[in-house]
Image (tube, rainbow, N blue to C red):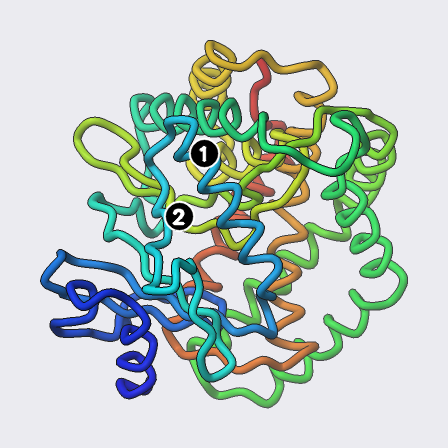
């Protein structure tokens, strides 16, 4: 991490945002290659994020910012709206990265998959419904009803796995098992094989869900795309902020609902029931959206874990030890959920 680059980026902003100290945030074990800094300026504390243009294009980030501006204009203020540069831009391009200076949102994350209570679930789902309400009026170029793009992506990726990628992945993992002497990697390899066993066990279920889901027409609007617990902040009053929108796009609200409830509630039917009741008190859900929610939750349990394994063992991307530990914890969470699914403990649709 280069302090000189940070000072160059901050020089694009008004003086009261760039005068002060900057600190790299090494404690954020994200799986992306983004850089995170805390900026202590005379105007207050801010969060500086630099994302590689190889993983997030300028057009994508401009679209994300446009949706967030729309949400704030409509009265939703729990998102970190990017500050403007002296040239009235929300993005600074520097050294192959796209930089955003964001307000520092107060609150605490719920880490390590600790159990949450019903009040946190209700607060999060009410907030999500409010976000969906305000972004539903954002103008999109396509028809308001259609097939979920996420279902099509999941179906395509599933076919790719079963047509050969899964066998190559298993072979790579077994070779690494014979070669490694590292304890952390050994744990990661063992948990990977457990997830792969579940993938093969539930292949028929997933194919059925994606096939049917690919025939359903649902409202399409801007959605967050990944409402993981790592991206939520809570205080004593409930949800206080949503901090990550890099996967924001046009899709069914079912994608966000499944992501949030799967991450926070796991397989707890009571928490799913509380969450859905809260959401539907603001925004009704169609039967088609409820079905897609179940399909997306199932896909998250299996396919998300496989994508991490793809990065690790097929694409052989380098990760820091703390990132590998984060992957290991997420794999354990997913396999624990799949074990409960195997024995009939599914989520509950009210």
Q: Position of residue 8 (x, y in %)?
A: 31, 81
In the picture, measured across the screen, residue 300 lies left or right of residue 39, that is right
Q: Position of residue 57 (x, y in %)?
A: 60, 66
Mark 2, secondary structure of its residue: helix
Q: Position of residue 283 (x, y in %)?
A: 53, 15
Residue that mark 2 sits on: 231
Number of marks:
2
Q: Are marks 2 and 1 in contact (CB under 8 Å)?
A: no
| Label 1 CA crowd tier, 10 Å (few <14, some 14–19, many 20+) | many
Residue 324 visible in the snapshot: no
Front one among 124 and 170: 124
Earlier in the chain: of badge 2 and badge 1, it is: 1
Q: Residue at x 31, y 28 (%)?
A: 120
Q: Residue at x 81, y 60 (%)?
A: 161
Question: Is 309 situated above or below 274?
Answer: below
Residue 71 — which label?
1
Quadrant where the image shows the C terminus: top right
Between marks 2 and 1 in the image, the one whose residue lies nearer the viewer: 1
Residue 341 visible in the snapshot: yes
In the picture, measured across the screen, residue 163 lies left or right of residue 176, that is right
Front one among 233 and 261: 233
How far apart marks 2 and 1 lie (CA) works out to: 17 Å
Q: Quadrant of residue 206?
A: top right
Q: Position of residue 181 (x, y in %)?
A: 48, 88
Q: Residue at x 25, y 75 (%)?
A: 24
Q: Quadrant of residue 317?
A: bottom right
Question: Is 89 situated above or below 232?
Answer: below
Mark 1, secondary structure of its residue: helix
In the picture, measured across the screen, residue 108 lies left or right of residue 146, that is left
């Amino acid at each position: 991490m280069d302090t000189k680059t940070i000072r160059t980026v901050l020089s694009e902003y008004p003086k009261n945002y760039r005068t002060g100290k900057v600190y790299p945030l090494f404690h954020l074990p994200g799986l992306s290659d983004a850089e995170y800094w805390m900026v202590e300026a005379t105007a207050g504390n801010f969060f500086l994020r630099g994302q590689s243009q190889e993983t997030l294009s300028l057009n994508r980030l401009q679209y994300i910012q446009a949706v967030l501006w729309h949400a704030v204009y409509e009265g939703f203020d729990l998102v970190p709206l990017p500050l403007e540069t002296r040239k009235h831009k929300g993005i600074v391009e520097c050294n192959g990265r796209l930089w955003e200076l964001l307000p520092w949102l107060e609150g605490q994350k719920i880490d390590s998959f600790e159990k949450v209570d019903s009040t946190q679930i209700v607060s999060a789902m009410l907030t999500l419904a409010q976000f969906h309400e305000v972004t539903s009026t954002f103008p999109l170029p396509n028809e308001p009803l259609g097939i979920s793009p996420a279902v099509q992506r999941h179906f395509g990726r599933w076919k790719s796995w079963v047509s050969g990628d899964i066998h190559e992945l298993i072979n790579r993992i077994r070779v690494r098992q014979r070669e490694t002497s590292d304890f952390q990697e050994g744990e990661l390899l063992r948990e990977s094989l457990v997830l792969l066993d579940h993938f093969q066990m539930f292949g028929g279920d997933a194919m059925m869900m994606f096939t049917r889901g690919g025939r359903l027409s649902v409202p399409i609007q801007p959605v967050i795309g990944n409402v993981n617990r790592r991206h939520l902040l809570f205080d004593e009053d409930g949800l206080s902020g949503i901090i990550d929108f890099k996967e924001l796009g046009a899709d069914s609200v079912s994608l966000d609902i499944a992501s949030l409830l799967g991450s926070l509630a796991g397989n707890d039917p009571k928490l799913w029931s509380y969450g859905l009741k809260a959401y539907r008190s603001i925004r009704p859900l169609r039967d088609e959206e409820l079905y897609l929610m179940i399909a997306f939750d199932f896909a998250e349990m299996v396919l998300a874990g496989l994508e991490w394994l793809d990065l690790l063992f097929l694409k052989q991307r380098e990760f820091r030890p703390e990132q590998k530990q984060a992957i290991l914890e997420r794999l354990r969470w997913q396999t624990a959920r799949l074990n409960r699914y195997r024995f009939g403990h599914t989520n509950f649709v009210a």
